[in-house]
Image (cartoon, rainbow, N blue to C red):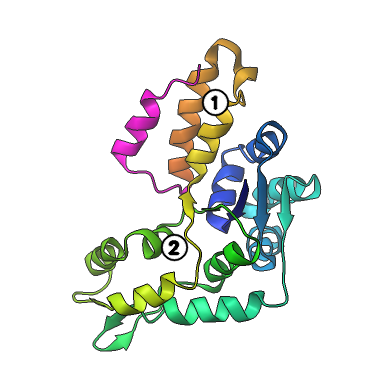
């Protein structure tokens, strides 16, 4: 299984000391985790220059150097990214003018899905997930936080979806759940399940967009 990773999920995993779950899943399940050059810059290059973010970046860099994560590039990645970015940022209109909602890093990850023939996109950031899965919900969210009235162009959304392959959307909590079922938390001995559930709550605090009912669902999961 090949999974394209966005910055948000890798940062969540690194901030909660769970980035090693990727190497674990690569070894135990043959999973491949790939990122774009732009994401590498977002999670390693830029944060290495900021002391408060440096340790998280070092953890991710170590995973990259140990081949738990790979950087994938292609000659047509920039063109595909530009096409997706242009389409996504025409979906929502304020007063008849397009409202930019997607950034280049996220568009680059979406572009890599088809180029790398990946099976899933790993992303915690809400906007990217909702723009693919539930654009109407994203509209409501933007209206509730930023603008009074927003128009959604459904035809434009169809054209946007045509640019990316049908794919599963995953969050860091789901990756951690897969690792847990494979035995990632067994080093905690009798506290294995407790450690898993605590890690899910930590992910939410780190930025993984889990609602309260989803947290409760994970709380009911047994990893035995």
Question: Gap in Å between the C-alphas at discs 2 and 1?
Answer: 27 Å
> Residue 42 location, x and y as percent?
63, 63
Quarter residue 155 falls in: bottom left
Q: Of 171 and 198, which appears nearest the observer?
A: 171
Question: Dot 1, how many residues are within 10 Å of its Cα: few (below 14), some (14-19), or many (20+)?
Answer: some
What residue is drawn where x is 56% and y is 81%?
Answer: 82
Left or right side of 116 for 201: left
Please check the rendered image and state whether residue 222 is part of the magenta-colored stretch, yes or no: yes
> Residue 119 location, x and y as percent?
56, 52
Left or right side of 183 for 49: right
Location of the N terminus (image quadrant): top right
Task: Please indicate, yes or no, whether residue 51 appears anywhere in the rendered image.
Answer: no
What residue is drawn where x is 44% and y is 62%?
Answer: 128
Helix, strand, or loop for circle 2? Answer: helix
Please check the rendered image and state whether residue 86 is part of the magenta-colored stretch, yes or no: no
Quarter residue 153 falls in: bottom left
Considering every residue shown, the one lying at the far left of the view is 148
Which segment is the magenta one? Answer: 207-224
> Residue 9 location, x and y as percent?
54, 50
Q: Which residue is mark 1?
A: 181
Considering every residue shown, the one lying at the far top of the view is 190
Helix, strand, or loop for circle 1? Answer: helix
* Mark closer to the observer (2, 1): 1
Is residue 103 placed above or below 211 in the rendered structure?
below
What residue is drawn where x is 54% and y is 40%?
Answer: 175
Q: Which residue is mark 2?
A: 128
Q: Of 115 and 16, which appears nearest the observer?
A: 115
Is residue 86 placed above or below 181 in the rendered structure?
below
Is residue 220 placed above or below 127 in the rendered structure?
above
Quarter residue 104 falls in: bottom right
Question: Dot 2, how many residues are within 10 Å of its Cα: few (below 14), some (14-19), or many (20+)?
Answer: many
């Amino acid at each position: 299984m090949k999974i394209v990773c966005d910055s948000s999920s890798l940062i969540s995993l690194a901030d909660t000391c769970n980035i090693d779950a990727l190497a674990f899943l690569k070894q135990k399940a043959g999973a491949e985790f790939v990122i774009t050059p732009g994401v590498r810059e977002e999670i390693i290059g830029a944060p290495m220059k900021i002391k408060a973010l440096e340790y998280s970046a070092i953890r991710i860099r170590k995973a990259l150097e140990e081949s738990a994560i790979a950087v994938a590039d292609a000659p047509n990645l920039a063109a595909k990214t530009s096409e997706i970015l242009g389409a996504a940022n025409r979906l929502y209109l304020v007063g008849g003018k397009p409202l930019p909602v997607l950034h280049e890093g996220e568009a680059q990850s979406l572009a890599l899905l088809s180029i790398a023939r990946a099976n899933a996109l790993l992303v915690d950031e809400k906007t990217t997930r909702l723009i693919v899965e539930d654009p109407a919900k994203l509209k409501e969210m933007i209206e509730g936080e930023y603008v009074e009235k927003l128009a959604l162009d459904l035809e434009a959304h169809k054209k946007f979806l045509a640019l990316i392959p049908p794919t599963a959307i995953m969050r860091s909590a789901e990756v951690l759940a897969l690792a847990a079922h494979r035995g990632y938390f067994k080093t905690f001995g009798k506290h294995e399940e407790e450690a898993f559930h605590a890690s899910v709550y930590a992910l939410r605090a780190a930025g993984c967009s889990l609602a309260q009912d989803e947290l409760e669902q994970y709380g009911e999961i047994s990893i035995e």
